[in-house]
Amino acid sequence: MGLMLLFSYALRYSLTLVMTLVLVTASTDGSSPPTNITAVLGDTTTFRCHIQKLGSPVIRLYIQKVIKDSQEIFINGFDSSRKLDVAPEYQKRTKVNRTDLSMEMTNVSISDEGLYKCIVFSDTMDKEMPKIHLKVTANYRVPTMDRKCSKHGDGAAGKSCQLSCSSVGGYPQSAVKWEGLNLSLINVIHNESYEDLYSKTWTINQTIMYNCDQPTNVSCAVEGAVSPAVSICEKEPFSIEVITAIVVVLVIVLLIILVLVLMKFCRGRSSRDQNEEAGFPLNACHLQLKVV
Ligand SMILES: *[C@@H]1O[C@H](CO)[C@@H](O)[C@H](O)[C@H]1NC(C)=O
Ligand SMILES: *[C@@H]1O[C@H](CO)[C@@H](O)[C@H](O)[C@H]1NC(C)=O
Ligand SMILES: *[C@@H]1O[C@H](CO)[C@@H](O)[C@H](O)[C@H]1NC(C)=O
Ligand SMILES: *[C@@H]1O[C@H](CO)[C@@H](O)[C@H](O)[C@H]1NC(C)=O
Ligand SMILES: *[C@@H]1O[C@H](CO)[C@@H](O)[C@H](O)[C@H]1NC(C)=O
Ligand SMILES: *[C@@H]1O[C@H](CO)[C@@H](O)[C@H](O)[C@H]1NC(C)=O
Ligand SMILES: *[C@@H]1O[C@H](CO)[C@@H](O)[C@H](O)[C@H]1NC(C)=O
């Protein structure tokens, strides 16, 4: 009887213990979804090892980067009993705050992107915090756009334009978007993107052909960066034939005015002095009078 009671107590106690352990494990689960943080290339970012109340003071903190599933490298941290070896690269760029268990990283590069984890040690336990995922972005430069437009070879109305758009220095890889064009009429003839091996940023470049018969303002965009708009297929104010006709008419009008002025001038002149020595104006007068 006494033995049964003891046994049942032991059972209940161990069950409670198991429940408690399960709860503790759940609240310190290092495999729960990571916290996302983002940083712009070259900026400073802060990793925060979010930690709920821990019974005893933290004596050690390791911040590690997960390279592959099981491979990790030590970035920085502290140990209250000894000095930790920090790789020179991170020695320069990271600073750990022991008070709030955070780490500041300066001059973030694209290779810093990835998964990090904090491991916190106190006298009574060690705890792996939810991982932190750092995402790095770099802003694309304002794209440059070139256009070459020509009349259709077959004499059809409208024009055929070759438009090129290019932007450098962005991350992650992206694509060119055209604004102001009817997308279903775009014909992509060249599309390339390549990565700078050193900075890991992308250059993207696209060339399209576009036929249009309406004046159109077009710009190209890569992520947030938009090129200035340029006009294509503007109506030419006058065709070559019209311009030629206008020039011809103007020349004729000018000639008539010249003739009239000369006639008036010569008449007055010749009536006043007939025997003037021959100068250029008089010669011209005689010529004009003879012609008229
Ligand atoms: C973090 O980003 C990933 C995608 O990159 C997303 O699936 C996940 O839900 C994000 N987590 C949080 C907590 O926002
Ligand atoms: C560490 O963090 C605490 C709380 O955020 C802050 O008050 C303190 O100034 C920080 N210490 C250093 C050295 O940055
Ligand atoms: C930032 O890092 C890049 C390489 O990732 C380096 O070329 C540059 O000099 C660094 N800038 C500063 C201010 O340290
Ligand atoms: C784009 O071009 C197609 C084919 O010519 C035409 O059917 C469509 O209406 C045009 N869309 C716009 C918005 O102009
Ligand atoms: C151009 O290349 C980029 C990156 O390689 C790709 O995402 C995009 O879909 C391509 N666009 C076209 C029209 O082929
Ligand atoms: C983009 O592609 C066009 C056509 O191939 C080329 O003329 C131009 O130089 C390229 N621009 C860049 C920045 O790569
Ligand atoms: C193009 O832009 C110019 C100047 O911004 C504007 O005057 C013109 O109306 C625009 N044309 C079209 C077709 O939107």
Image: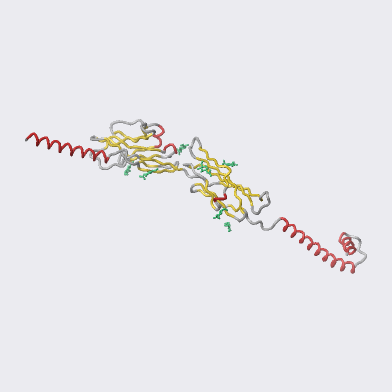
Q: Given the current orientation, which residue lies at the most extreme left position? A: 1
Work out whether 207 lies above or below 126: below
Q: Nearer the viewer, residue 81 or 184?
A: 184
The quadrant of the rendering that contains the C terminus is: bottom right
The answer to which quarter of the image holds residue 215 is bottom right
Q: Colour scheme of this structure image?
A: secondary structure
Percent x, y for residue 241? 73, 57
Judge left or right: residue 126 versus residue 162: left
Percent x, y for residue 39? 42, 43
Q: Nearer the viewer, residue 234 or 106?
A: 234
Count of numbered circles on the image: 0
Q: Nearer the viewer, residue 173 or 154?
A: 154
The quadrant of the rendering that contains the N terminus is: top left
Judge left or right: residue 162 versus residue 243: left
Percent x, y for residue 205? 55, 43
Judge left or right: residue 191 versus residue 46: right
Q: Quadrant of ligand 7?
A: bottom right
Percent x, y for residue 147? 61, 48
